[in-house]
Image (cartoon, helix red, strand yellow):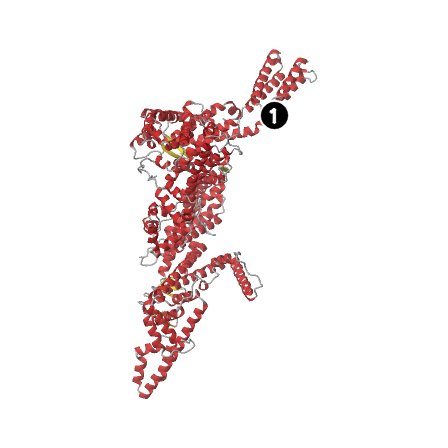
């Protein structure tokens, strides 16, 4: 009959593909469960308030039009909805595809069962498939995996979260319009069950059977599968566990499958007492906590509580006398086998001969160890015991007492068992690989010995006192031939024949009185020894390795192993060489990967790589977590070293007096430093002792593991230092910025020095790691801060700076900023606020407007450079860019609102434009026209001024940052600075030449050169922030004239100072000239150059008209004064405040003219 899993057997291949797909789906669900967007969980009240109107559960489907109309009625909700869609559609789609695959899985399984019943597969029916060994395994697995999927979904992705995700997908995707969409069926299958995985949560009624019955499955199929599981050993595991007390462990996989599948036919759990008694007696006579899939544990005492028949059947197992008996038995077994394993692990005990002679004994010891570990780990697990359930608590307490449970002793047993198992496996693998060669070697040696003896008895070859004997000569030659004829492939016949040959050699020695000749005896003894070795060699079979693999399964501890993490770490801290033993434990845990990957591999599925990567990645992450104690311990020692070097050890001067030598020796502190350094090197040696190991499909290099661990610890400590060091009190009388930066700078310098000190002792590139990780921390924090200004946000799993193995920690925000870089930026903006301070451009310094005290200067940016490095300044610059963009966008919205939608303002602007046209002319009666327009638009200038000043303030900061970066680059990397400047000039020259002659080359669209060089130039400060285009703009009517009016409206608030230029006239009405000018310049730069030209033309016209009017007025005034010939009258006109205001308009040129006229009049 055709093999069921043969490639040309369509029936077998179809069910194999279904089962393979099932394992892949579960891996995808487990992977996705770690990436559920927090907003769908509603754990944060702020999220609930913000997104409550756009994220819906299944109540949405009762009236989608109503909900959508509510959204459409509010533009701000529509905008938020669109932003949410852009940010989450990718991950929501991924979840939907996983949910869809679960539904498709059960549909495919039902279709396969229908095909079997309808005879689509020739000569195959449900009954014949269940008679086949592979067939019944696959059918049972297919149904079991569907149940596991449903349980995993409910446990890892809460019902309400599923509903919100499905509704979001329905709203944001085109699925609703697709004719073949099965959205309705998916929603019916995965709607909320009411189950909660939170500890102490109440179990919903009829759960999970009602959940399992949402998609009907052939009842006959379920019944037959349960029948097979009840009666058969479908995986033939009992052969690997011959002892009767190991029966429940042998059938553990089958028991887990039966537990899940029974929920598809809950009537058995409720009423079929005989069947349940049979199931419990067979599978659960001595255990009640089971692992159903990859470490997901279930306590039957709790799970079967609502089912009468199941509960009654389990009562015998849960009887306290039985609990006490089992606990005591496993306590005794574990003590006994632990002693045996420790004996086996003694140096030189496990030799090849000893192993080959004691295979059954060694395997029995392995079985006892693994069974004891399994029972104790499962039945003492916290996850399997609900603390609110009195009976479960009582049973667990009983187990802990009677088994004399000690987690350290159990962990030591696990460690020793894993080591013992690993050594045995390695020995057997080596023996198997050498089996053929050794067999041939022993056969050749034995045959040659017999040939030599034959030659001795021929009389030709002289040997002391051996007479010629033709019979013996012929007999030994025949034995030699018989030895050579032994066939390695037919092990049974060869073994029997070898035993006969050994007996024959013993008899010939006895009957022919050959004992008298020691040399002949030695030859015979050697031959018998070689024949014995041949028997041992032929008994080396792969079946032993397979049995060890089955017995050593640790998949039940996939999650439970985490309980022992602290014990492992403490062991490593005390003895770093413990890592070598842990390696065996990690490899033992890797055996759990066989369970989900077996069928995927058999089906040659493309999912093999992704599923392998997921489980291997999870295991490697756990290995990293355990071994992270080494970098942690190293850093603890490092901090002590830095403290000693910084505070205790005095630097030895180049010259010192002889009598002071003892003072500078400081033997105590130096000994302490040496001791700590030695401890660090011992930790390093410990992790490097772990050889390169293949964990699943991921190769774990201990050197890389150490480096990653050091990086992780560095990132954790530096990120925390940055977070704590840059928290400011806005109510502080004087700014805390500079003191905090100096303090943080000292901390960062300490980390840097410690890395520099330790790099040689642990063989790492300290400076490289420092720069890479600090830049990553700062860039990640800048990215997260900039997310506030982005519509489509960069999630952690999308970030190029975030890492799974070396994660950058996130901290709870302490104010409106998300990260330390945001707090730093906002603190700088706060202390340099143009409303409170005045910026003196010549000194690059900010002064308080009221007290005239210095607030800060360019030294601030030097301090940031010292503390956070180039990355910090560059990140700050990038954040300021985003803030400027936001301010400019807000400005455009404000312009639309207060100018273009205000009829009065528009009429005023229209009148003004008519009055000043053409711009080359001089405006008659200019004062009246200009001041009339300013008066009518007075209400809009406050918000306008605030927006312009904010942009100008940030541009000044960007200029200061660029100056500091450029200075630093020229000082620290003069060759880089020169190269960048030359490349920049060359590129600009080429581009300019191209525009003059288009035949010359120009970078193509797909060429990233210009983009990449810009990043380098900005990092080196070789750029001008004032030339940057921040936003794209459309044409705005009246834009130049509005800016012109704004500028002349602000002039009365300013006065000219010959030392400082334009300064604020009154601190009560603050206007700072540099940010005002730079803000206006930046704003005009965002529009077409004709707007700037028109703006300047208006300014020029204003100056000409004002000067013309003032000159005319002065002539008139002086004439009147002269005619009156009265000095007093002249003085009155020239000193009148109202007249002066009209005449001067606070323009410096006019003021000077007035002074001149005043003198001439006098």
Q: Quadrant of residue 298?
A: top left
- Look at 61% across and 16% down and name the residue there: 521
Q: Work out whether residue 549 or residue 276 is closer to the camera in this orientation and state it.
A: 276
Q: Residue at x 59, y 27 (%)?
A: 437
Q: Is residue 958 visible?
A: yes
**1138 in relation to 470, above or below:** below
Where does residue 850 sit, x and y in percent of width and height? 32, 66
Q: Count all numbered tags in the image, as a single digit.
A: 1
Picture coordinates of residue 651, whole percent (x, y): 44, 50
When asked about the image quadrant of residue 485, the answer is top right
Instruction: State the residue in front, 270 or 875.
Output: 270
Query: In the current view of this chain or complex, which residue is farthest to the right?
Result: 460
Q: Quadrant of the C terminus?
A: bottom left
Depth check: give the residue in front, 787 or 929.
929
**Vertical placement of residue 1039 versus 199, above or below:** below
Q: Is residue 645 left or right of residue 984?
A: left
x, y percentage for residue 412?
41, 31
Q: Residues within 10 Å of mark 1 (few under 14, many from 20)?
A: some
- Where residue 436 appears, as percent x and y from the top left, is 58, 27
* SS state under label 1: helix
Residue situated in front as seen by the camera: 704 or 781: 781
Mark 1 — residue? 440
In this rendering, the answer to whether 326 lies above or below 215 is above
């Amino acid at each position: 009959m055709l093999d069921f899993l043969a490639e040309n057997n369509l029936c077998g291949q179809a069910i194999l593909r279904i089962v393979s797909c099932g394992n892949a789906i579960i891996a995808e669900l487990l992977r996705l469960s770690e990436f559920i967007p927090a907003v769908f969980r509603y754990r944060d009240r702020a999220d609930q308030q913000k997104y409550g109107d756009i994220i819906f559960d299944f109540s949405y489907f009762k009236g989608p039009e109503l909900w959508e109309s509510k959204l459409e009625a509010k533009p701000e909700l529509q905008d938020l909805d669109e932003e949410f869609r852009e940010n989450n559609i990718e991950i929501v789609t991924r979840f939907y595809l996983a949910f869809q695959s679960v539904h498709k899985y059960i549909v495919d399984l039902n279709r396969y069962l229908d095909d079997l019943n309808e005879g689509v597969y020739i000569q195959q029916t449900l009954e014949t498939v269940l008679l086949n060994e592979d067939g019944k395994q696959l059918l049972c697995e297919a149904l079991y995996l569907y149940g596991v999927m449903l349980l995993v979904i409910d446990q890892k992705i809460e019902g309400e979260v599923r509903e919100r995700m499905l509704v979001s997908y329905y709203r944001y995707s085109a699925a609703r319009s697709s004719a073949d969409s099965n959205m309705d069926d998916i929603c019916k299958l995965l709607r909320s069950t009411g189950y909660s995985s939170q500890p102490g949560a109440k179990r919903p009624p009829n759960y999970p059977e009602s959940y399992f019955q949402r998609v009907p499955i052939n009842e006959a199929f379920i019944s037959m599968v349960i029948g097979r599981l009840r009666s058969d050993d479908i995986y033939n595991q009992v052969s690997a566990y011959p002892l009767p007390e190991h029966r429940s462990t042998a059938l553990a996989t089958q028991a887990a499958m039966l537990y899940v599948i029974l929920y598809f036919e809950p009537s058995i759990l409720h009423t079929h007492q005989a069947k349940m008694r049979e199931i419990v007696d067979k599978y659960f006579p001595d255990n009640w906590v089971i692992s159903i899939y990859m470490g997901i544990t279930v306590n039957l005492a709790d799970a079967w509580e609502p089912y009468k028949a199941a509960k009654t059947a389990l009562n015998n197992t849960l009887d306290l006398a039985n609990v006490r008996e089992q606990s005591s038995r496993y306590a005794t077994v574990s003590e006994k086998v632990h002693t045996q394993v420790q004996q086996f692990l003694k140096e030189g005990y496990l030799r090849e001969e000893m192993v080959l002679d004691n295979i059954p004994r060694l395997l029995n010891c392995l079985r006892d160890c693994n069974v004891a570990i399994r029972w104790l780990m499962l039945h003492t697990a916290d996850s399997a015991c609900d603390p609110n359930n009195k009976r479960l608590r009582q049973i667990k307490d009983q187990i802990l007492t009677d088994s004399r449970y000690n987690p350290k002793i159990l962990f030591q047993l696990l460690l020793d068992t894993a080591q013992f198992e690993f050594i045995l496996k390695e020995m057997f693998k080596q023996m198997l690989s050498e089996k053929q060669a050794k067999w041939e070697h022993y056969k050749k040696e034995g045959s040659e010995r017999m040939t030599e003896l034959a030659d001795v008895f021929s009389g030709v070859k002289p040997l002391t006192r051996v007479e010629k004997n033709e019979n013996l000569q012929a007999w030994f030659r025949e034995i030699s031939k018989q030895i050579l004829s032994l066939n390695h492939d037919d092990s049974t016949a060869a073994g029997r024949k070898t035993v006969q040959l050994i007996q024959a050699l013993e008899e010939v020695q006895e009957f022919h009185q050959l004992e008298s000749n020691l040399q002949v005896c030695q030859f015979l003894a050697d031959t018998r020894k070689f024949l014995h070795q041949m028997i041992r060699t032929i008994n080396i079979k792969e079946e032993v390795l397979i049995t060890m693999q089955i017995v050593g399964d640790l998949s039940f501890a996939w999650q439970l192993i985490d309980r022992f993490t602290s014990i492992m770490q403490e062991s490593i801290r005390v003895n770093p060489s413990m890592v070598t033993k842990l390696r065996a434990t990690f490899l033992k845990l890797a055996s759990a990967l066989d369970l989900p990957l077996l069928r995927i591999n058999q089906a040659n599925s493309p999912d093999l790589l992704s599923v392998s990567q997921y489980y291997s990645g999870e295991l490697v992450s756990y290995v990293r977590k355990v071994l992270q104690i080494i970098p942690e311990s190293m850093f603890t020692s490092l901090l002590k070293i830095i403290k000693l070097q910084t505070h205790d050890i005095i630097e030895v001067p180049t010259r010192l007096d002889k009598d002071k030598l003892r003072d500078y020796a400081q033997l105590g502190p130096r000994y302490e430093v040496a001791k700590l350094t030695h401890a660090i090197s011992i930790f390093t040696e410990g992790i490097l002792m772990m050889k390169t190991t293949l964990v699943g499909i991921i190769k774990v290099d201990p050197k890389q593991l150490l480096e990653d661990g050091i990086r992780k610890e560095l990132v954790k400590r530096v990120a925390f230092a940055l977070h704590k060091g840059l928290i400011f009190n806005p109510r502080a009388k004087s700014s805390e910025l500079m003191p905090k930066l100096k303090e943080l700078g000292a901390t960062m310098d300490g980390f840097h020095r410690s890395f520099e000190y330790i790099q040689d002792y642990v063989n790492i590139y300290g400076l490289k790691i420092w720069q890479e990780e600090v830049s990553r921390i700062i860039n990640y924090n800048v990215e997260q801060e900039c997310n506030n200004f982005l519509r489509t946000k960069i999630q952690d799993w999308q970030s190029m700076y975030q890492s799974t193995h070396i994660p950058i920690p996130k901290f709870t925000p302490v104010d409106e900023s998300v990260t330390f870089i945001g707090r730093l930026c906002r603190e700088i903006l706060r202390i340099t606020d143009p409303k409170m301070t005045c910026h003196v451009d010549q000194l690059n310094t900010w002064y308080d407007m009221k007290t005239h005290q210095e607030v800060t200067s360019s030294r601030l940016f030097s301090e940031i450079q010292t503390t956070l490095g180039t990355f910090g300044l560059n990140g700050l610059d990038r954040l300021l860019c985003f803030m400027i963009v936001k301010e400019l966008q807000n400005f455009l919205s404000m312009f639309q609102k207060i100018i273009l939608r205000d009829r009065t303002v528009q009429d005023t602007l229209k009148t003004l434009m008519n009055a000043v046209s053409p711009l080359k002319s001089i405006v008659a009666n200019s004062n009246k026209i200009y001041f009339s327009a300013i008066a009518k638009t007075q209400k809009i200038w406050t918000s306008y001024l605030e927006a312009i000043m904010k942009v100008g303030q940030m541009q000044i900061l960007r200029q200061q940052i660029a100056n500091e970066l450029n200075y630093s680059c020229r000082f620290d990397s003069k060759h880089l600075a020169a190269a960048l400047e030359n490349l920049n000039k060359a590129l600009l020259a080429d581009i300019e030449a191209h525009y003059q002659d288009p035949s010359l080359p120009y970078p193509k669209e797909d060429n990233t050169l210009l983009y990449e060089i810009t990043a380098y130039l900005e990092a080196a400060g070789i750029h001008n922030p004032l030339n940057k285009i921040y936003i794209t703009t459309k044409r705005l009517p009246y834009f130049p004239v509005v800016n012109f009016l704004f500028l002349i409206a602000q002039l009365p608030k300013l006065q000219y100072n010959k030392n400082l230029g334009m300064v604020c006239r009154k601190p009560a009405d603050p206007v700072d000239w540099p940010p005002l000018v730079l803000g206006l310049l930046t704003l005009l730069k965002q529009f077409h150059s004709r707007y700037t030209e028109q703006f300047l033309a208006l300014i020029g016209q204003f100056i000409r008209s004002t000067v013309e009017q003032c000159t005319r007025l002065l002539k008139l005034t002086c004439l009147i004064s002269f005619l009156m010939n009265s000095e007093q009258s002249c003085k009155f006109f020239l000193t009148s405040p109202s007249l002066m205001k009209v005449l001067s308009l606070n323009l410096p040129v006019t003021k000077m003219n007035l002074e001149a006229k005043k003198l001439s009049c006098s």
